[in-house]
Amino acid sequence: MTQPTPPPELPAVTKPPTAPLAAPPTAAHAGARTTELLPIPRLTGPIQLDGIPDEPAWQAVTPVSFTTHWPEFGKAPREPTEARIAHDERYLYVAFRNGDSKPDTIKVTTLKRDSIDFPSQDLNCVLIDSFNDNENSLAFYTNPAGVRSDGAITHDATVTPALVSDPNFFWDVVTHRDAQGWSSEFRIPFSTLRYNVVDGKVTMGIILYRMIPRLAELSTFPAIEA
C-alpha cells in the first residue's frame, strides 16, 4: 500500500466496489461490474469550492449521465442529474448538478455529521474503491445542506454493518440550492485515499449516487441493474 503523488493523468475504472447502500449487496454488486474505462482529466484551471461548478475548468470536463436503479432499472431519471469528475495535484473532485422541477420539496432531515438517514432525504454519494479490488471502498455523501457523512465498506459489503461510519476522513463538500434544484462539489485529498500506481497510472473503482425521496428514486453512474 502506497500513497504516491498522483500522475498527470488519472484513469479510473467505472467498476463499482460494492452494492448500492439500500440494496442487497450480492445481487446489485453483480449487476454493477463493468470494465469500461473512464479517464479522469486534470482540471485546466482554477475552481472555487462554492457548490456551483460553473467555472470554465469545470465546463471543460465532460459530464456523466445517470440511470435509474430503482424503482425501475434502466429508465431515464425523472429529474435530470449530471456529474463531472476531475483532479489536480492534490485532490479528486466530483461535482453534481441535481435538477429538480419542485425545488421546494427538496428534503433535508439532519444537520449533524454522520447522521444522514438514507434514503429519507435528498443526497449525493461518491463511492471510491481506491485499490480497484472489488472488496473495499470509502463512501462520501452529503445532503443539500452540505452535511458530511462518510464511512468504510469492507468485504464487498457482505458483513454487518455494511457501512462503518466510525472513521471521519479528511475531505470537503459544499452545496448550493437555487430555483433549478441543487448542486454539490466534493473535494477529496489524495492523502485520504490509499492506492497503487501501475505503469504510471492509477486505477480506481468509482460509483456515484443521487437519491430523490419524494420520487422514491435512486439513480447511479454507472448504471447498476437492480
Image: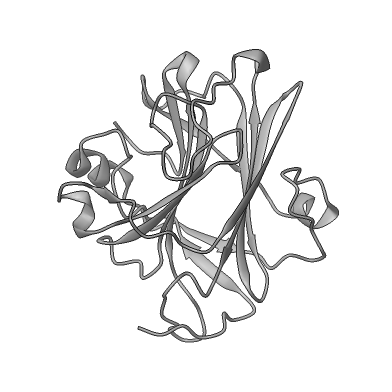
Q: Residue at x 61, y 34 (%)?
A: 145
- Location of residue 53 with respect to 172 vertically, above or below: above
- Location of residue 11 with respect to 48 vertically, above or below: below
Q: How is the image coloured?
A: one colour
Q: Residue furthest left?
A: 159
Q: Quadrant of residue 224?
A: top left
The quarter of the picture where the N terminus appears is bottom left
Residue 101 seen from this side: no
Q: Give the total of numbered labels.
A: 0
Q: Residue at x 52, y 24 (%)?
A: 77
The quarter of the picture where the C terminus appears is top left
Position of 122 with respect to 119 (left or right) is right
- The image position of residue 42, as x and y in percent, is 69, 68
Q: Nearer the viewer, residue 194 or 63?
A: 194
Q: Residue at x 42, y 45 (%)?
A: 114
- The image position of residue 89, as x and y in percent, is 66, 76
Position of 214 with respect to 17 (left or right) is right
- The image position of residue 55, as x and y in percent, is 83, 51
Q: Residue furthest front?
A: 112
Q: Residue at x 68, y 71 (%)?
A: 88
Residue 148 seen from this side: yes
Position of 49 with respect to 121 (left or right) is right
